[in-house]
Image (cartoon, helix red, strand yellow):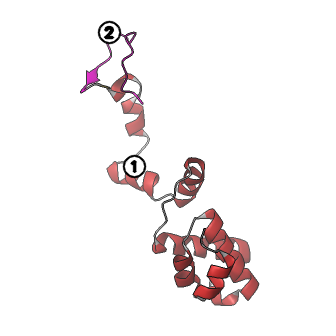
Amino acid sequence: MFKGRVPALPDDWKIINGYISPENYCDIHTGMNMFRDARHYFVMLSKDVESYRELAVELDDTDFLSDEELFLQIYRILKEEYRVTKLSELSKAQVLDVAYKLHFDYRSSNQQIVRLLKLSIFEINNLFPAR
């Protein structure tokens, strides 16, 4: 995006290997102050699953979340929407509702849904046929 041949760049802008240096368009010091350290930066950008989901939908991203990340989301859904802590406390219809959320909101694969919700592959493939 920033590699271009625009002749009207300000004279004081740094160009490194044909790219405009981020120092020219970002306040690096302010950005660094937003995070406690490098680990905090990484966690905030890569582990915030809710933000990832919204961003992924916007970007039409086809990446999948790991089973561990999806398990955390299932647990959150159980607590917030159903007021239970175990999947076994849900009715079959509620489990299928969670399957729909995983498939459409988190772009889970059929195999992930089968593993995490302990449903049959036949059931899930009928709900979400391969495109």
Q: Residue furthest front?
A: 131
Amino acid, disc 1 = Tyr
Query: Relative to 8, is 54 on the left or the right?
Result: right
| Circle 1: element type | helix
In the depicted structure, whether residue 61 falls above or below residue 124 = above
Q: Where is residue 110 in the image (x, y as percent from the top left)?
A: 56, 76
Secondary structure mostly seen in the magenta stretch: loop
Amino acid, disc 2 = Asp
On-image quarter of the C terminus = bottom right
Q: Can residue 119 be seen in this view?
A: no
Instruction: Report if residue 100 lies within the magenta region.
Output: no
Query: Relative to 79, is 109 on the left or the right?
Result: left
Name the residue located 57 percent from the left edge and 65 percent from the top edge. 107
What residue would you read off at disc 1?
Answer: 41
Q: Where is residue 89 in the image (x, y as percent from the top left)?
A: 69, 89
Q: How many marks?
A: 2
